[in-house]
Amino acid sequence: MAKETLDPALVLLERVQNLLRDSSYTTTYKFALLRALCDLAIELPDNTSNIALQTIAERFIHLYWRQVQPFTPPNQDACLNIKQGSATILNLVQGYVRDCDGRLSNTAHQNRMRSYSKVVAAQLKRYVVPLLQGKNEFLYSWKPGQDSIQLFPGVLATLRRFHALLCDLIDGAWTRWVERRNIQVRNSDALRKHLFGFERENIESVREPLIELQRGLCFYSGEKLSRGERANHIDHFIPWSLARHESLGNLVVCTSKVNLKWSDTLKPARDRARWEVRNKKHALRLQEIANTNGLRWDPRATLAVAKWAYASAG
């Protein structure tokens, strides 16, 4: 069958796969650009075609802010600084993390985020955006000097349609790249979690404020919540397995029983409606909790992710 008769989405997937097979990468920045585009695809409006480099730069900071922190391999006492090639962008992210006391809240530190993302965007413009696709553009078009990229028709839809698959492919290739250049962390299951997972202790600080907001009741069942981590769980309303969306608006507290029941599945429409009302009604309080605890607060992106997730589920 001629390639021209294939589903354009599958052709695009094949080309992304070929990019990930390229062993000549000298940094992880190309992986980060692909990952940033996948994340933004489900957070931006449906009709998006033009993406500012500064918006992509903010996603770079989100992707790297944990990775630039020291990693302690299992059964070892010494912390390691993971090598990822050229340190220019990594140093900028480290500067942001240092200035913000290790917190990623883009509401409490808007001015710093704008300042750092502007400089990161300049690096993307010089060293990353022009080089990812080579001469055969298929994801986006870009001309020297432009401050944004223009997605080709169908790219946004494909990135959304295959979001989970693409994220797994990118994260896997990224992890293998790091392992090849950091002998001490080879074959470490903890490495991928360090690079791309979320640490539950990072969100533990919001447990009590969210319980108070929920008047001490399970968000889903309305049962009275018992105290203690084992008795109640902090749950990602849009499951982490579907979209690694870390904004505070995606977090609720529920009983451990209810959380295990729903696991990685989408909740019923009635719960979605209540969740959206909560985020809108208590927006100021949720933003305050996010600022206090150094978490992201982005209600527009959270709604967009929810719309994408439920539409994908049919």
Image: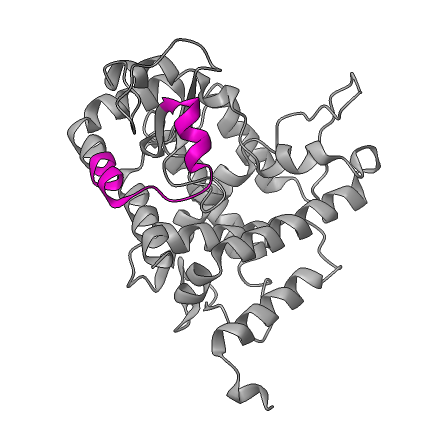
Q: Residue at x 25, y 35 (%)?
A: 275
Quarter-wise, where is residue 22 in the image?
A: bottom right
Q: Main secondary structure of the magenta part?
A: helix
Q: Residue at x 34, y 65 (%)?
A: 49
Give the magenta-colored segment's residue range.
Answer: 254-276
- Tell me if residue 145 is in the magenta stretch: no
Colouring of the image: one colour
Relative to residue 242, is residue 295 depicted above or below? above
**Residue 153 placed where, x, y %?**
39, 73
**Residue 16 placed where, x, y %?**
59, 66
**Which residue, as the protein is rendered here, is positioned at the far left?**
281
Relative to residue 212, is residue 139 depicted above or below? below
> What quarter of the picture does the C terminus occupy?
bottom left
Numbered-mark total: 0
- Tell me if residue 271 is in the magenta stretch: yes
Q: Residue at x 72, y 23 (%)?
A: 72
**Which residue, as the protein is rendered here, is positioned at the far bottom?**
2
Relative to residue 172, is residue 132 depicted above or below? below
